[in-house]
Amino acid sequence: VIWLSLNVLLFWKTFLLYNRGPEYHYLHQMLGLGLCLSRASASVLNLNCSLILLPMCRTLLAYLRGSQKVPSRRTRRLLDKSRTFHITCGVTICIFSGVHVAAHLVNALNFSVNYREDFIELNAARYRDEDPRKLLFTTVPGLTGVCMVLVLFLMITASTYAIRVSNYDIFWYTHNLFFVFYMLLMLHVSGGLLKYQTNLDTHPPGCINLNGTHYQDVHLPVYLSERFHESVRGGFSEPDELTRNTFIKICMEEPRFQATFPQTWLWISGPLCLYCAERLYRCIRSNKPVTIISVISHPSDVMEIRMVKENFKARPGQYIILHCPSVSALENHPFTLTMCPTETKATFGVHLKIVGDWTERFRDLLLPPSSQDSEILPFVQSRQYPKDDWKPYKLRRLYFIWVCRDIQSFRWFADLLCVLHNKFWQENRPDYVNIQLYLSQTDGLQKIIGEKYHALNSRLFIGRPRWKLLFDEIAKCNRGKTVGVFCCGPNSISKTLHKLSNQNNSYGTRFEYNKESFS
């Protein structure tokens, strides 16, 4: 709401300034509505070009999210939606860039058609009816504007979901053109084509300058012309009743114009420097060596990597950025931690689903072809969980609901689920974790049902979850409490869960929806 209000207020305020501001009187006469729309859209672009960088300062956001600097839960939830805010700002930039370009196309035409012989310095064209295309391709604002449109078009098209999933390299490399975009933006505002009047006191907008070079073209009423010449010979006298009531303004000085001061750098210099410092810090931090302890190939094209890094700290639910120069010099990817370091063991790990060219090359680099189809290796001993003291943890119950199409997708995680189940049974906390596995296809069902995964047999269901009934059951068992909903899956399921989370229930249970998606 605050962001939307700022955009509306900034657009409307700038529009009124260029539409009614006395310093832009003559420029508005020449360009008309195109001037107001171009400057109002430019103000919105300045705001969003500065804000779009802030959600990408991941280190800063992680620090604020995990520290006591942000005590409010609502504020922390807003920080979790940084990616959504980044996309929203990007869409806004695209829309208002279209408005800005269209308005300046009209301005280029009006500069040519409405060439002012009396105010030469106000013109951007060199003569009347000059080809508007020359203004677009021979001036600094025009040429940089065309280049920015091309860069923005590349970034937009490469940001689509299909390209991000199929070829992430294209998305990543084109998105790094943002630096070129901002450099062009700095040059774009330095052209000085739009000018404002500086001597409003001595030349009120619209007044007639009888000392000017164009006085011979001005026809005044006889009574006003006689009184003017009399006042000039003897100095200016007090205006009489006749001249005081006239609507004709008379002045003795030509209007003077000056290029508008570029304000774009005031908007974007701070966020741009902050983001560059963030990237530099991440680059320095990423140069610290990471030791890969083991690489495990799981069924369904899943690979597990266990690593150790000095002074590395993380908490459950966080993610890390993997960067492998041997695969791609600039490309990096976020992955949620599936194993966190503890006080007694510094090992941490992630699971990678082999989708896309980067993960395929990464797998080929780490795993020889002969080991890519190996069975699951035991990794129970490396898992660390609280043994006795659960009081410091706010989490009191966990509902784990997993929906898969293929039975093989469960196998790489089945060992951990069985370990969790047995652990909580031994600690007399069988209701701490509620596991529900849903299989949408029945092919190969007997492969997982057996003595090895006996604890999961009663928790495996055929079909899809009935989300409404699940939410009602959870709300009934947790009356008057807050339940966090974390979804990682397709948009169709995400929309359903988000809608159910926002619905009221008769048990006073509050659901807070969270979605994790890196695609």
Image (tube, rainbow, N blue to C red):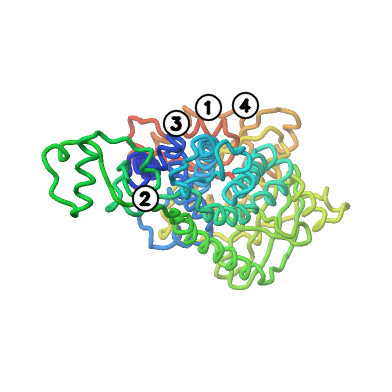
User: Which residue lies at the image location 61% right of the left edge and 58% below the top edge?
Assistant: 320
Name the residue at the right extreme: 370
The answer to whether residue 401 is above or below residue 82 is: above
The answer to whether residue 21 shows anywhere in this view is yes
Identify the mark at residue 47; answer none if there is no mark. none
Residue annotated with mark 3: 500
Distance (Cα) linking label 4 and label 1:
9 Å
Choose between 498 and 18: the one closer to the eye.
18
As helix, strand or loop, the secondary structure at mark 2 comes to: loop
Q: Of the residues shown, which amino acid type is indicated by label 2?
A: Pro
Q: Of the residues shown, which amino acid type is indicated by label 4?
A: Gly
Which one is closest to the eye, mark 3 or mark 2?
2
Q: Contact (CB < 8 A) between labels 3 and 4? A: no
x, y percent for residue 152: 62, 44
Choose between 376 and 446: the one closer to the eye.
376
Residue annotated with mark 1: 466
The answer to whether residue 519 shows anywhere in this view is no
Residue annotated with mark 4: 463
10 Å crowding of disc 4: few (<14), some (14-19), many (20+): some
10 Å crowding of disc 1: few (<14), some (14-19), many (20+): few
Residue 439 as seen in the image, left or right of residue 485 = right
Which one is earlier in the sequence, the residue at label 1 or at label 2? 2
Which one is earlier in the sequence, the residue at label 2 or at label 4? 2
Residue annotated with mark 2: 255
x, y percent for residue 477: 40, 37
Distance (Cα) linking label 3 and label 4:
20 Å
Residue 301 as seen in the image, left or right of residue 205 = right
User: Which residue lies at the image location 76% right of the left edge and 32% below the top edge?
Assistant: 444
